[in-house]
Each structure stands twice: as C-alpha cells, then as structure tokens.
Amino acid sequence: MAPTKARQDLKAKFVRNAIPTEQDFKDLIDAPLNQSDDGIFRNSGEPLSIVAGNDAQKRVLRFYGTPPSGATEPDWLISLNPGQDPNDAATNRAGFGIADGAGATRLYLDATGNLGVGTNDPQAKLHVAGGGARIEGDLTVAGTTTFTGAITASGPVSLGRDDGSTNVVMRGPVRAANSDVYFTKTDHLATGIGNTPGFAAIQNAQNYDALMILGRQTTSGRIVKLWDRLEVNGEFRTTGNGDFDGSLRVGTTTSPLLLVGRPNPPGAGTVRIGDWLLRTNGNILEIVHAPPRITGLGGGVGTTDKIVARFDANGPAAGPFGRLSLP
C-alpha cells in the first residue's frame, strides 16, 4: 500500500505533548512496507524477495522517473507473465518481461534462455522483432547463420576465413547490386566441386591460370548453356572433342565470314566462307554459291543457292568425274 503521509507529516503527529488520533496511528502503520500485505520480505541469509501482484501479467515493479501523483502511468514495468499486447490477455506468456508504461513488452526472457526484443515469443536465443539490429563493433558467429530477409551493408562484408577453410552457403539467389564480382584470391586452386552430380562452379584457379566455369555435372558430362549472344573479344579456341550441335558464326549476321553448323541429326552440317557454302548431308558434300539474300516488301528478293559441285563418298570411283559431279 502506498504511504498516505510523508515522514515529516507523521513525525509532527508524534511529538511531545501531541495527542495522535486513530487516523494518525493508521497512517503510521500503513507508512512502512508490510511483508504479508505488500509481498516484500527478506529471510535470513537470503536476498530481498518481491511477490508479483494478482493481475494477469503478474507485475512486480513499477519505475517512475518522477514521484507519481494519482493514476500516473509508470515509465517502465517488470512482469512475470507479460503480454505483448497489454489489452489482449491471450498474448500473456510466463517469463521475465520489461514493458513500457502502457504495458507493451519491450524485452522478454523465457525459462529456456531465449531472449526476445520486441516480442514475448522468441524463437531463438536472440529474436529481434520489428525494426532492425545494429552492431557498431565486430560480430562473431561460430555456428550456422540463416537469413530469411534482405541484408544491407553500407561497408565491406567479409564472409569466410582468409585461408578458405570456411565456405559461405547461400540458400537463395545472389544479386550483385553494383554489377561487379571480383575474385581476388590469386593462389586459389581449382576444386572438384564441379564433378559432383548437379553441382556447378565459377573458380579463379591458379593451377589452370584461368577463370573457369564448371558446368552442371550430368550423366553426359558438365554442361554450360548460354542462351544469349556471346561476344569473344580475343582468340577463340576449343580444346575438347565434344559434339557441336548448333551453329558458329564469325562476322555479322547478314554477311558472315564463316558459318559452321551441325544440325540434328549428326552427319549434316554447313560451313560458310564468304558467299560460299560447304554443305554436308551424310556421305554427300556440296559446294554451293549462296550470297546473302536481300529481304524487302513481298518476301525474299535476290539470287538463290546454286550447287556448283557435289561429291558422293559412296559414288563410283570410275567415270569421267568419279565421285564428283557438276550439276
């Protein structure tokens, strides 16, 4: 019970020759704390004990910046069954809670050791709800870290150790907002991750002296597919012996200097050199004059392909032309 009289007022009632009234004695009895009525006590050899109130949130302490007058709300509250919403008893949850003067829980600790900031239902050892967390110094994470939202950093972010012994695992898409990705480890050695079924990799490999793209590993080998135009501003060299399904054009689309094609099925293909084609179909090789057509209103206008010579690998060896014929 809050004191009804200040100490100075009570002292004035009990001076020499004063006759205290019944109300004066009541005020004197109510002035100090009572262990039974007020729930504040200290057993021998134990710390001070405070019993929570009988309200739904089991409030223990109220803190005031200035002495309260009347029904003034406190600045802070400590409760043992705090509610996230002071007006909804369904949000009450047993634990240690610090609430604002209106009773909304701001900091909460449950019996398992989970700490909630802005929530009284923390799902981890530290659960920050609403707003964000800011760390001015270093942050060391020894275990697995899972991010389900966006991460924004105004400065450099370093993930993993300098020796490369710790991997950085991204469970979702990775976007380079300023369009640059740098590989600055000059002594990195290529790993075998690209040989794992379903895996792919980009590596700056010292032992191959190259930036390597290891395609997705499949039963047919590693595969890299480029869906858009590829421009090579240097030497183009192939060192493998794999199939070539598609076309290779050197020069412009309308006037290619070299066009190599190997459409499906295998055995058919085309090589363009200027206005000439070397065209194959099985055992037949044709030399074709095929200048680019000019497209205008009403369809194609210009010359048509002209077969100049045909060579049949399975044709007769004898005769005036043997396996070669001139249409």
Image (cartoon, grey):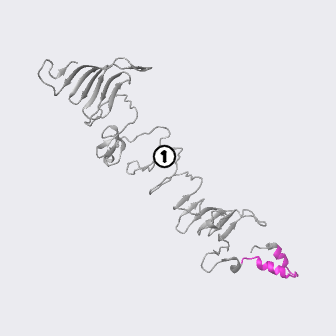
- Answer with left or right where residue 290 lies relative to residue 309: right
Q: Residue at x 73, y 64 (%)?
A: 73
- Answer with left or right where residue 68 lies relative to residue 155: right
> Could you say which is closer to the camera, residue 270 or residue 56?
270
> Could you say which is closer to the camera, residue 89 or residue 61?
89
> Magenta span covers which residues?
9-33
> Could you say which is closer to the camera, residue 255 or residue 142?
255
Residue denoted by label 1 = 157
Helix, strand or loop under label 1: loop
| Residue reaching furthest to the front | 298
Residue 14 visible in the displayed image = no
- Residue 14 in magenta stretch: yes
Residue 156 horizontal/vertical position (percent) = 49, 44
Q: Residue at x 11, y 21 (%)?
A: 318
Asked if 303 appears above or below 11 in the picture, the reply is: above
Asked if 73 appears above or below 151 in the picture, the reply is: below
- Answer with left or right where residue 201 lies relative to residue 52: left
The amino acid beneath tag 1 is Val
Residue 81 horizontal/vertical position (percent) = 62, 69
On-image quarter of the C terminus: top left
Q: Residue at x 24, y 23 (%)?
A: 286
| Residue reaching furthest to the left | 318
Q: Residue at x 65, y 65 (%)?
A: 88
> Could you say which is closer to the camera, residue 298 or residue 80?
298
